[in-house]
Image: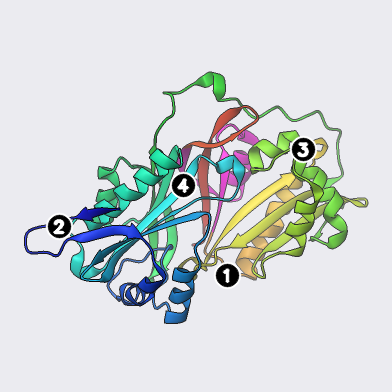
Amino acid sequence: MNSDPGPAGSTPCLIRPLHPNDAGSLYNLLGQPSLPNCGHFEPAAEFPALQEFANQPRDDQHRLVAVSDGRAVGLSILGRPPNPRLAHLGQVSFLVIPDRQGQEIGTNLLNALIDIAEKWLNLKRLEADVPANVTAVQHIFRQAGFAAEAIRKESLFGDGQFQDEGSLTRLSGFDARDDAKHRPTPEPPETSDRKVSEMLIQPLGDQDTDWLYEILRAFENCRSILQLPSQEIWLTHKRIQERSAAMWRLVAVAGERVVGVITKKPYSQRCRAHTAGLGMRARTDYWGPGIGSRLMERAMELADRWLNLTRVELILHTDNPAGIQLSEKFGFALEGTKPFHTYGGGGWADSYFMARVAD
């Protein structure tokens, strides 16, 4: 793609797409003990895993390497979320072998990804997560136009301790703040009093598919939970049947129907095994009577007493005061803001990072 001349005395680098023959170089690159802790790259990766990674490209990833003297000395990845509501968004990361750091290889890898993202894919929001103590890498991102959005407390575990993580973002192609396109969440409909104390909180079951489908495709819910009102029921069936072994889902049942659901999903990376993401939604005709508190109470009990989770995190639209108040009630704190995070209902929405970190 392009060449990195490097400083005087160094061997120039070629920036090009990843090739299956690069598996051996990746094995040497990722096996370096001095590499910074990062959720995107697992330390001590075995060769068969890296060979599989190099041989199996994905439609939602663009992977570039910096090659010098026939070996890959740097790797960068641009990932795209599968959700169509996030089609404007990409996640970027890069890694450079220690003996070639400080030679602008990381800068060139990052700039090559930005060119792909903005000139070919029309991505308007690029995100990067970097350990807060790795200032050199953060500096490279800032030079490329990334700005800090949040500090995520104890988001990573590495080198024998919990570490904070900085979330950075580069925005492009947005107008300055267009309030006409930034629409608030619709007001919830009027509801009658419900006997919340009599509701059952239990694990999600196969018989709950139809009720869950009604909740997920309701217009008032769709905007805030990254769903689409046009989704078909087979997708709900798939989500119930293809659950992760580490995922926990609880439902609130009134009579014989499901009126609310909460999901706790731990991260797959080992350095984030102490962390889980949280999501919750309810039938719109049951908004407001305390279902959220019942579900959140059980979810936090599960996190603290059974799963030993140190950190539970969630993302909420900034115009969702009820959700923010409920989260704060259970110890969640604001860590940062994502401008232009999602599009839906005819407008853009900003989101808050929030997390609950155990003592």
Which residue position holds label 1?
308
Mark 1, mark 3: which one is toward the viewer?
3
For image coordinates 58% across by 31% down, the residue present is 319
Picture layout, residue 344 above or below residue 86: above
Is the residue marked by circle 2 packed among few (<14), some (14-19), or many (20+) residues within 10 Å?
some
Q: What amino acid is at disc 4? A: Gly
Is the residue marked by circle 3 packed among few (<14), some (14-19), or many (20+) residues within 10 Å?
some
For image coordinates 78% across by 37% down, the residue present is 284
SS type, badge 3:
loop
Tell me residue 244's x, y (percent): 66, 66
Tell me residue 352's x, y (percent): 51, 41
Is the residue marked by circle 1 packed among few (<14), some (14-19), or many (20+) residues within 10 Å?
few
Mark 1, mark 2: which one is toward the viewer?
2
For image coordinates 50% across by 45% down, the residue present is 353
**Exactly how many numbered labels are in the figure?**
4
SS type, badge 2:
loop
Which residue position holds label 2?
6
Stretch in magenta: 312-338
Tell me residue 52's x, y (percent): 49, 74
Tell me the distance, in whole angstroms, between the alpha carbons under discs 4 and 3: 27 Å
